[in-house]
Image (cartoon, helix red, strand yellow):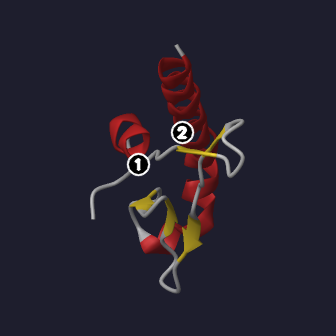
Amino acid sequence: MPLANEGRLRDSVKITRTAQQKGWQTTVKLTIYDNGIVGINDIPLNPNPSQGVDVADERMPGALRAIVDEFKRRVEAESS
């Protein structure tokens, strides 16, 4: 499974309208597997399971920022 990079994370963003059609939403799925791999939206953040959560903790802020930036970009594109 290839590791997270900004492009893969941005591609993983899916946006939908809210139930009342008055806003936009996305879901971020965080997974910690039994073997120590940590992933966001099914994209692994740590290359080596033995490094576990420590490496994922370092990469998490950048990964979440990429997802939020892409969400905002798509909402702006849909709203204009």
Residue at the extreme top: 80
Instruction: Return the x and y of residue 33 as percentages of the image width and height.
Output: 51, 80
Instruction: Return the x and y of residue 9 as percentages of the image width and height.
Output: 42, 44
Quadrant including the N terminus: bottom left
Q: What element carries label 2?
A: helix
Residue at 49%, 28% (x, y): give it.
Answer: 74
Residue at 52%, 43% (x, y): give it.
Answer: 15
| Most foreground residue, 35 or 39 | 39
Residue at the extreme bottom: 34
* Total marks placed: 2
Q: What element carries label 1?
A: loop
C-alpha distance separating marks 2 and 1: 8 Å
Residue 12: mark:
1
Residue at the extreme front: 20
Left or right of 58? Residue 41 is left
Residue 48: mark:
none
Residue 63 versus residue 42 in the image, above or below? above
Q: Are marks 2 and 1 in contact (CB under 8 Å)?
A: yes
Dot 2 corresponds to which residue? 67
Residue at the extreme left: 1
Left or right of 58? Residue 8 is left
> Which is nearer the N-term, disc 2 or disc 1?
1
| Most foreground residue, 70 or 33 | 70
| Most foreground residue, 19 or 43 | 19
Instruction: Return the x and y of residue 61 as percentages of the image width and height.
Output: 64, 41
Residue 70 versus residue 50 in the image, above or below? above
Residue at 72%, 36% (x, y): give it.
Answer: 22
